[in-house]
Image (spheres, rainbow, N blue to C red):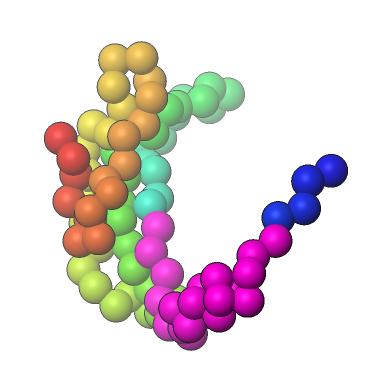
Amino acid sequence: MVYLTRSFQQRHAFEAHVSRVDRSAGHLLFAERQAPRGTVTRPEHALTVTVDNNGTFTGTPVVHHDVRDERGSITLPTDPQGRSPK
């Protein structure tokens, strides 16, 4: 078992930067068409959204097309405005 400890100054500096969370951002993966009954589809697109604590959109949702590469790995946008790295 490993225990991580911080000095008082490190804890104080960390706590000083933590503030109240007033919104959340995330990605929703989706496919353009529904899969035939009994089969599974792999989502190819993503929607970046930001919502407040009540679930109300705080920005415009952004659609990202073709987020999977040829091996099937997903590359999601890392930019705060939801812009894709491609």
Q: Is residue 51 left or right of residue 85?
A: right
Q: Residue at x 24, y 73 (%)?
A: 59
Q: Is residue 17 left or right of residue 62?
A: right
Q: Residue at x 58, y 24 (%)?
A: 38
Left or right, 11 with reference to 16: right
Q: Which residue lies at the image location 23% right of the left edge and 53% below the top edge?
A: 79
Residue 66 in picture, x, y percent from top left:
23, 32
Residue 18 is at least partly visible in this image: no
Location of residue 16 in the rendering, given as x and y in whole percent from the top left corner:
48, 83
Where residue 76 sits in the image (x, y, percent)?
Answer: 31, 41
47 falls in the magenta region: no
Between residue 79 and residue 82, name the one nearer to us: 79
What segment is highlighted magenta in the picture? 5-26
Q: Above or below — where is 23 with respect to 46? A: below
For residue 12, above or below residue 45: below
* Location of residue 32 by image quarter: top left
Which residue of the protein is positioned furthest toward the top in this rendering?
71
Q: Is residue 79 visible?
A: yes
| Residue closest to the eye, 65 or 79 | 79
